[in-house]
Image (cartoon, rainbow, N blue to C red):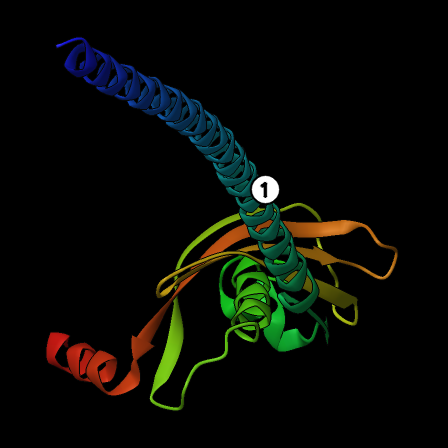
Amino acid sequence: VSGVSRVVSGVSGAVSGVSGAVSEVSGVLSEVSGAVSGVSGVVSGVSDFIARHFLYSFQKFTFAAGLATSLFRKNILKMEKKFSQTMLVSEKDTALTMGSGDLPVLATPALVAFMENTAKKLISLPATQSSVGVSVSLRHLKPSPVGAELRCEACLEREEGRRYTFRIAVFDNAGELIGEAQHERVAVDVERFMRNAVSAS
């Protein structure tokens, strides 16, 4: 019996040792798991920081690119959408000849025609289309006698679909302002426009 007790006691000690070893292994695994969890947390934090930083940088780049494009387009508009030309006032341009007045000076209708002609040359359209004036807000500030040379400057301020808005000014040889206007034109299909004009008459 004493021998059996010693054997049982030895087995119990062995089992206890194995349990201790298992417990130590479990502790090590727990520490490893904790370390892995910590590394995962760090990686997750770094990834989140990189993602936020990239998104912020991309947003700044997109904003800057959009602003640059907008400024470029505005500068192109300023460079390409201006036109000027000159005219000599003749007898046929006077208020006396045109019937809009009694004096031999530049008629306001002739001034308007000069402005419209300058503005329409800023519009490029296919052969099947043309532009027509739809409104003019004009100030005729100074008379111009026969023989006077005038310079008209037109600037395309806005283009919205088929509608074009211009700012126009006319000067004499001395650089004095003769007249100024805001003018609107609309692009039309020539065939359809003329068909409607004939049917309306």
Vertical side of 155 occupied by 36: above or below: above
Quarter holding the N terminus? top left
Q: Residue at x 81, y 50 (%)?
A: 176
Q: Quadrant of residue 83?
A: bottom right
Q: Amino acid at mark 1?
A: Ser
In the image shown, does 97 or 113 lie closer to the viewer?
113
Residue 119 placed where, x, y %?
Answer: 56, 67
Quarter holding the C terminus? bottom left
The number of numbered badges drawn on the structure is: 1
Q: Residue at x 52, y 67 (%)?
A: 116
In the image shown, does 41 or 20 lie closer to the viewer?
20
In the image shown, does 102 or 41 lie closer to the viewer?
41
In the image shown, does 104 or 62 lie closer to the viewer?
62
Q: Residue at x 40, y 91 (%)?
A: 127
Residue 166 placed where, x, y %?
Answer: 53, 56
Vertical side of 95 occupied by 35: above or below: above
Residue 121 placed where, x, y %?
Answer: 56, 76
The answer to whether residue 105 of the structure is visible from this angle is no
Secondary structure beneath label 1: helix
Q: Which residue is mark 1?
A: 57
57 vs 173, left or right, is left
135 vs 91, left or right, is left
Q: Residue at x 59, y 56 (%)?
A: 69
